[in-house]
Amino acid sequence: MLRHTYGGRSAADSALSPAPARGTRTALAWALCASLGTVGGVAAVTPALAQQADSAVARSSYRIAAGPLASVLHQFASHAGVRVQLDPALARGRQSGGLSGDYSIQEGLAALLSEHGLQAVRQGGGYAVVATAASDASTLTLAPVSVQGQTGQTLRYAGEQVAPGSRVGLLGDRDFMETPFSTVAYTEKYIADQQATDIQQIIAKTDPSVFISGIAGESLESYSIRGLPSAVNDVSVNGLAGVGAYHRNAPEMFERIDVLKGPSALLNGMPPKGSAGGAVNLVTKRAGDDPLTRFTGSWQSDAQVGGHVDVGRRFGDNNEFGVRFNGVYRDGETAVKKQDKEVKMASLGLDWRGERARLSADLYHMEDYTEGLTRGLTLAPGVAVPKPPKPGTSWNPPWSFFDNTDKGGLLRGEFDITDQLMVYATAGLSKSEIDTIMGVGNVLNSSGDFSINYSGVSDRMERKSAEVGLQGSVQTGVVGHRFAVNATYYKEDYTLRGFRNLLPNNWLSNIYRPEWGPEVARPSNIPALTDTGTTLTSVGAADTLSFFDEQLQLTVGVRHQQVESEVKSYLPGPAQPRYDKNATTPAAALLYRATEQVSLYANYSEGLSQGPIAPIGTTNAGEVFKPFKSKQHEIGVKFDLGEFAHTLSLYEIKRPNGYTDNNQYVFGGEQRNRGVEWGFFGAPVVSLRVMGGVAYSDAEVTRAVTPNLEGQQATGLPEWQAKLGVEWDVPVVERLTLTANTSYASKQYVDAANTQSIPDRTLLDLGARYRTGLANYPVTFRAAVTNVTNKAYWATPHFTNLALGAPRTFQLSASVDF
C-alpha cells in the first residue's frame, strides 16, 4: 500500500550513529518513548506520553498554517527533521487547524493527530500514523526511517549532504518535491567536509549544471549556471540581495547554500549584476539547542595554514536567545608558484524566537588578500592555443596582488499575525573595497612568447537593501492557496578608480619560462573613472493554488520592477543621461504529485537584468543600456526514492547579449541555451552516498553583428559536463569514510568564431574522513587531494581567454568539539 513519507536522513548515517541526536535531553526523550506506552509492540505518541516526555525533550517553535492534514503533517516533519509515514486513506478529507507555538516532536505529533482519532507509532526510529483504535499496528510494513533531532539547525537529508528543502525566493521555504523548479540545498556538514574556501567550490563540486574554470588565485568567484554567467555579487544572504561579500564569500559562516537554476525575477527580483542562469542564496548559521564549541585546524599545500573557531550557545528559560560566532584565519603559500594568500573572517549571528515573533541579526567582516594573483592570458589574432605549461606556473610577479575587504550586516523580523498569516521585514548594508595590481599577458606566437603590462583598480562599493513581505494561506472551497506579497529595495553606489600601463614599455617573456622585472610601485593618486548610482525597487505577488489534497499545484505570479541608474563619467566623451525605466515580469509553474515518489513540473519564468555599461576601451565607454529580459521554458521530473533522489529536466533560455563592433559596444545580440540535466543525490545502499549527474548545454549565438558568428557556440562554456562524488563508509574500519570525486568537461571555444578551443578535461579528487575521540572530545580528521594526477590543463578565466587550471593540491584538517 502506498504511504506518504516525510522528512528524515539517510539510512547510512543511522547505521553510523544512534537515532537520537547529541544531547542528554534528546537521548532521555528517546529512552522515555522506548519505555512508555506502546501500540502493537512499537512506541505510540499519545498526549499522555508526550506530557511525560515533555521535560526531557527540547522544543522547537512552529508556525504551520491550517490546511489539509497531509500538507500540515508534511510541513511539521520537514521542520522537525523526522520521517513520518501516512496512508493517504487516513488523510483523505481531513483538515488540520495547523500548529503554532513551542512543541517537542512528540507533543507536536500528538497535537496534530489526536483530534482526528489518529496517533503516531514508532518503528525503526521513525513514525507511522495509525488510527487510535488499531490494535494490530505491529503488522504495519514500513521502510527504514530515522530521526534527525537537532532542532534549531538546518535539517539534513540524503546522507546529511543535501537539505530536504530550500528557500525559493518570494515563495519562502519549499520542500524539494514540492518545488516546481530545479533546486538543490547543501548542508553545513557537506560544506565542512569539502574543506572549501569559497562558495563556488561547493556548488560546482558535483552539480553538472554549474561550471567553474578551476583556476586558483582569481580575484573573485566566477561560475556559470545553465551556460549563463552568474555573478558572485548577485548572491543573496538569508534571501536579501546586496549584503554578502562583493567578490568572494567565506563558507564557514553559512549552514546552508541554496541553488535555484534558471532565471527568477518573480521569485528574487532583478539581480543587481544581471545573473540569469540561476540564483544562489546563503543561509547564515544559527545556534542549536546543544552548546557548540568547535575548532578546526587546516593545512593546504604548499604552506597554507589556518584555523576556524565555531561557537554556538542558546540562553533563556526556553532557549529563546541564540548566539553563533565564527572566526577564520588562513595564511601562507598556495600550490601555485610565487602565490601567497591570506584570509580573515569574523561573523556573528544572533537570534531570538518567541511564541509568535522571531528576530535575527548577522554581522561579518572579511579580508581576502592574495599576492601573485591569477589574471590569465589573451591570444593574438591567428595564434593557436599553445600547449599548457607545468601546473602551478604563474605569469604575474609576486608583487601583483588583489586586496578585498568586505563588511556587512542584516536584520530580520517575523511576526505571526494569525496561524495562517505572517509578516516580515529585513534590511541590510554592506561596504566593499578592492585594490589591485594585475597584468594580462598577450600570447604572440605558438612558442608561448607573451607581452605584458600592468594595470590596477581601487574600487569602492556601498550597498543598501531591504524587503518587506506577507506570507499566508487560505482555503476557498476545494482550492487551497499559499500566497505571498513583497516589496524590495536595492541601492548601490559604485566608485571606479583605475590606472593602465604601469610600465613605460611592455615586458616580453614566455609562458613556459616566465621572468619578471623589479617590483613597480602603485601610483599614489589613482584617478577616478566613473561614479555609478543604481536603485532597484520592485513589488511582487504570487499564489500557489492547490487541488485534490495538494496533488496538483499551480503557481502564478508577477513582479513590477523599477530601475534607476545614473553614471558620472570622468572619461572623454558625452555625458550619460540619467536612466529611469520599468518592466513587468510574469511567471507560472505547475507541479503534479503523481505519487509520493514522483513529481512532474513545468515552468515559464523570466529574468530581468540591468542593462550593461559599455566597457572601457570602446568608443562609447560608460554608456548605460536599458534592462533586458531572459526567458526560460522548463519541464522536469523528480524522483524521491526515500534515501536517493533524482531530477531530470529539459529547458530553453533565451537571453540578449552584447558585442563590440568597430570598437563600439552594441547590445543587440541573442544567445539561446537549450539543455538537458540529470542530477542525483543520496544513499542508494547503506554506507554508500553518491552525488552527481550529467548535463548537456547547447549555448548557441542566434543573433550577432556578423552572420558568420550566428549558430556558433558561446565562448568559455562546455557542451557536456559529467560529475560524480562518492562517499563510502568502510565496513571493516568503523567511522572511516573514503571519498572520491571525478568531473569531466568537454572542449570550450575561446573565440566567437569557434576557431580556437581548449581541449576537454577529466579531473580526479580523492580523500578520506575519520571520526574518533581524543580525551573524550569528538574529533574528525579530513584529508583530500584535488587534481590527483597533477594534470596540466587550460581553463577559461573570468576576464580573459586562457588561464592554467589549479595544480595538484593537498588538504588536511582536524575538527575538535569541546
Image (cartoon, rainbow, N blue to C red):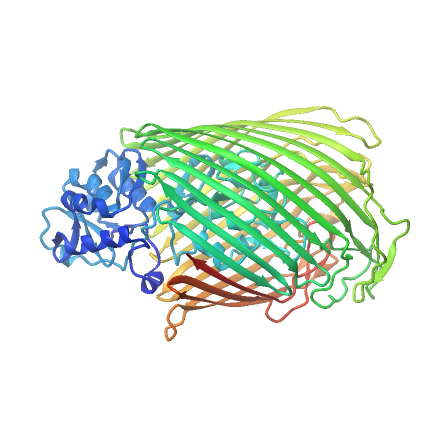
Query: Is 545 placed left or right of 765 in the picture?
Result: left
Name the foreground residue: 394 vs 789.
394
Query: Is 477 placed left or right of 787 in the picture?
Result: left
Residue 623 visible from this viewpoint: no
The residue furthest bottom is 732
Q: Residue at x 82, y 64 (%)?
A: 446
Q: Position of residue 686 (x, y in %)?
A: 35, 66
- Where 644 falls versus 770 (above or below)? above
Quadrant position of residue 287: top left
Residue 682 visible from this viewpoint: yes
The residue furthest right is 504
Q: Position of residue 623 (x, y in %)?
A: 75, 32
Q: Residue at x 68, y 55 (%)?
A: 796
So how many labels did they put on this image? 0
Q: Quadrant of the N terminus?
A: bottom left
The residue furthest front is 775
Q: Position of residue 361 (x, y in %)?
A: 47, 36
Q: Position of residue 31 (x, y in %)?
A: 21, 55
